[in-house]
Amino acid sequence: MGTPHVPWSCGDIRGGVGHCEPAQRLRIRAREPPVIADTLTDALRAALAAAGLPEPEGGPTLEPTARREHGDFQTNVALRLAKAVGEAPRDVAARIAAALEAAAPAHLERTEIAGPGFINLFLAPSWLHEVLAEVVGADGGYGRGTALAGSRINLEFVSANPTGPLHAGGGRWVAVGDALANVLAAQGAEVHREYYLNDAGNQLDTFARSLMARYAGEEPPEDGYHGQYLVDMAARLRAELGDAVDEATAREWGYAAVLASLKEDLARIGVHFDTWFSERTLHERGDVPEVLAQLVASGHTYERDGATWLASEALGDQRDRVLVKGDGSTTYLANDLAYHRDKMRRGWTHLIDIWGADHHGQVRSLQTGLQAIGIGTPEAPEPEIILGQLVKLERGGELVRISKRAGNVITLADILDEVDPDVCRLTFLLQGIDTAQTFDLDVVTSQSMENPVYYVQYAHARVASIARRATEAGVVRAPLATVDLSALTHERELDLLRALAEYPSVLASAAELRAPHRVTTWVRDFASRFHGFYRDCRVITDDPVLTQARLWLAEAVRIGLADALGILGVHAPDVMERLDGDDDEAGE
RNA sequence: GCGCUCGUAGCUCAACGGAUAGAGCAUUUGACUACGGAUCAAAAGGUUGGGGGUUCGAAUCCCUCCGAGCGCGCCA
C-alpha cells in the first residue's frame, strides 16, 4: 500500500525520528544581550574572585529579568554556589553583591538580593541608549552572531516526491525550512538549501501509470494517484504531444511538468533552492553500488533470504534493514545512504534534514548506516534530522479529511490563490514544529484580527508613516552622534529598547534550538510594544531634542521589525493596504 | 505490543531548570478634534492530563498511569 501519503499531511515529505539531543547538535552559545552583558559578566567574575568564591560550572550567567521590579538583569550564581560553599544562598549572594557594588561596572546603579538568593541588577537607562546606538550602528548586522562561522551547512527540506503538486501541509516545511536557513545564516553559517528529487523509484512509475490511465480516459490503478490534477495534466499531455504517447514519454513529460509546477509554487511563496538534486544522478554515476561495497567492506552487512541486510540493530536501530532486495534492486535506504554520502562528499561540514514525523522510523536507519561507513557518530550523527509534526487542515470548524482517492487534495497553490504569501508563511511559523499544527483555512484566508501578520506589518508601516510625516514637516534626522538619547526615559521607550537588547539572544537560541518560530514570538511581542509606545509617545513634537531621540528610536524599531520579518521571509511594508471595514459583508 | 512526538486559559499557541506560568482570539468594560483605530488600556479566565521522584527551585529532567498523533515492509 505504500506510504499512506496523506495529501495535506505532508505524507510524502521524507520523515524521521525525534529531535537530536542538543549535545548532538552544532552547539551555539546563546548570547546575552549586547555589550552590556559582557561587561556585567566580567564584573560578576571579578566580584566572585574578590569575594573569594569559585565560579560555578559553566561560568556565571546573567539573564534578563522577567519582571521590571526585579531590575534589568538577574543572576543565580549564589544559588548554584551555595551548596559547594556550604553557606546559605542569600549569604553568598550578599557577599557577591557587595563585591559587585564595590567595583561597580558601567551603568550599574544598585543590586538587590531577592527570593531564594537571586542577585538583581538595576541599571541606569543609559545602557539602553547604548543598545539603540548598537542597533543603528550595526548597519544591518544587529543581532547577528558568529557561533556558526566557518560551518557550511546543507539544509534539505520539502523534498516532496515529484508526482504531484505541493500539499497545503507541505507549506509548513517550506516556511520553516527557509526561515531556519536564515536563522542559521544569522549565526554566520553558510547555508545551502537543497531539494531531493526522488525521481528514480517506483513512485514515478506509479505516477506514469496513473497519468496514462487518465490519458486513456480511465481511472488510475488502485494504488495510483487519483487527484484531479492528473486529469488536467493528461489533457495537456494530449494537446502537446498528441494521441500516441507511450508510458515512458508520459512519465518524463509528466515529471517535467510537475517539477515546473513545484518550482512555480515555491517561487510564489518566495523560496529558492540552491540545488535540486536528482536521485537519478546517483544511479547514473554508480554511487549506489559503491556505497554498498563500502557497507559490505565495513562488515556491517549480511546475506539472508536472498537479500543483503544492514546489521543496523547492533548500531542502535530498532531492527536490521534490507539494502538489496531479492530481485537485485536497491531499497530506498540504500539510495538514501548514497545520497547523503554524496552530500558529505560535496564538502558540507554538517547536514540537516527536515522531515515529517511520519518518517521518524527511518532516522536511525539512515544515521547508523552512514556511521557504518564513517560518516557521523552516535554522539553527533549525520544528518541531523529535524522532525516536524504534521499539519491538520480545518475549514468551517471541521477537520478536512484527506482522501487521495476522492482527489480532494488541498494544495499550497490553492492557499496561495486565496492568501498573501506573507500570511501563509507567518501562519506556518507561528508555532514550534513539535506539535501538530491545525491550519484553519477560514482564519488564514480572512484578513481578520486573528491574523498576526497584519499586526506586525502594521507596526512597520506605522514607523514608515512617521518617517514620511517627519519628512513632510521638514524634520530631518540629525547624525546619531549629535543626538541626546538620554531624552528617552519613558517606560514605553525603554521597553522597546529592552526588547531590542534581547533580540541577539533570540536569534541565537532560535538557531541553537532549530526553532525559527521563536523569532515570530519575539517580533509579535516587539510589535505589541511598539503599538503601546505609539499610543503613549508622540514622535514628532515641539521638543527638538526629544523628537530627534524618538526619530532614532523609531529607526531602531524599524530595523528590528524589518530584520525579524526578513528572517521569517515575510515582507515589511511601508504602507498597508487599507481594509475597507465599512461594507464588509463578512463582518460580524 | 514496541518506538518517536506531544498533552499549558473556552479556542489557537508561548515560556535557555528560575521568582507571581505569558500572548493573541473569543467574552466584558473603557480610550483619539495631533504621527494610519488593522491600534491602545483594563477586567475575567490555570491544580501546566493524573500520581510519584530529583532539585534551593520543575510546565521543563526521571519513573509510572491516562489520552492524542505518527511510525514499526525485500514501499518510497
Image: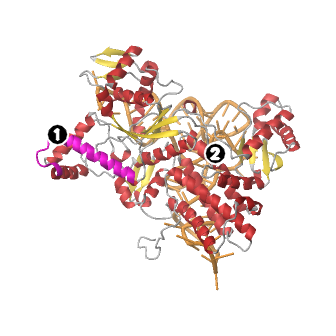
Quarter location, residue A456: bottom right
Residue drawn 26% across the image and 25% down it:
A329
Image coordinates of residue A402 in percent, x first then y, are 32, 48
User: Which residue, given by chain and number where applicable, does mark 1 sit on?
Assistant: A247
Which segment did they paint magenta? A240-267
Question: Label 1 is placed on what type of residue?
Answer: Glu
Quadrant of the frame with the N terminus of chain A: top left
Residue A505 numbered tag: 2
> Is residue A237 in sight in this rendering?
yes
Q: Quadrant of residue A104?
A: top right
What residue type is disc 2 on? Ser
Does residue A265 belong to the magenta stretch? yes
Dominant SS of magenta comes to helix
**Please, what secondary structure does the residue beneath circle 2 have?**
helix
Sequence-earlier tag: 2 or 1: 1
Residue A207 picture location, percent across and down: 24, 41
Q: Secondary structure at mark 1?
A: helix
Taking A549 as reference, is A146 left or right? left
Query: Which residue is the extreme one toward the left?
Result: A244
Residue A153: x and y in percent read 50, 36
Distance from the alpha carbon under mark 2 to that under mark 1: 55 Å
